Amino acid sequence: MLCGTTVIELARSGADISGVVSFHGALDSPKPEDGKNIRCRVLALHGADDPFVPAKDVAAFEDEMRLAKVDWQLLKFGGASTPFTEKAAGDDNSKGAPIMRKPTDVPGDMQRFFAEIFH
């Protein structure tokens, strides 16, 4: 979960970058007002059943992005928990359910995002 959180915090720092992609990161912010510092595009890929990221944190992230007028996307994968990119997670949602899409779709989401920002 830490890596996905790290890139969002990098964006919140105001770093001069084109974009960030967060895979199953925590979406909450210790300082939501830092959203105003984001100068890049944001793609967050999130397991909708992630027990570590409550619905209130997802809603707060969405509000933060909107208020800061960030160019952002949040893709929520139904039936998926924390490590939804890991096939070894199995189908026990307490350990992280698999994504309900072809495994190649998640990397494709990231590749399409990068193609848009680095055209």
Image: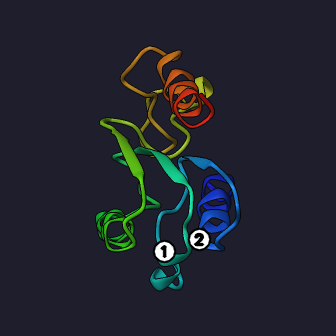
Residue nearer the viewer, 75 or 1? 75
Q: Amino acid at mark 2?
A: Arg
> Circle 1 sits on which residue?
35
Which element carries disc 1, helix, strand or loop? helix
**Measured from the top left, where is residue 91 in percent x and y?**
44, 28
Q: Quadrant of residue 5?
A: bottom right
Q: Residue at coordinates 29% horizontally, 66% vertically from top-left? A: 59
- Give left or right: position of 104 versus 59: right
In this rendering, the answer to whether 101 lies above or below 25 is above
- Give left or right: position of 30 versus 100: right
In this rendering, the answer to whether 84 lies above or below 42 is above
> Circle 2 sits on which residue?
12
**Measured from the top left, where is residue 114 in percent x and y?**
59, 32
Q: Amino acid at mark 1?
A: Gly
Which element carries disc 2, helix, strand or loop? helix
Q: Where does the C terminus fall, quadrant-wise?
A: top right
**Measured from the top left, where is residue 109 in percent x and y?**
48, 28
In this rendering, the answer to whether 26 lies above or below 112 is below
In this rendering, the answer to whether 42 lies above or below 8 is above
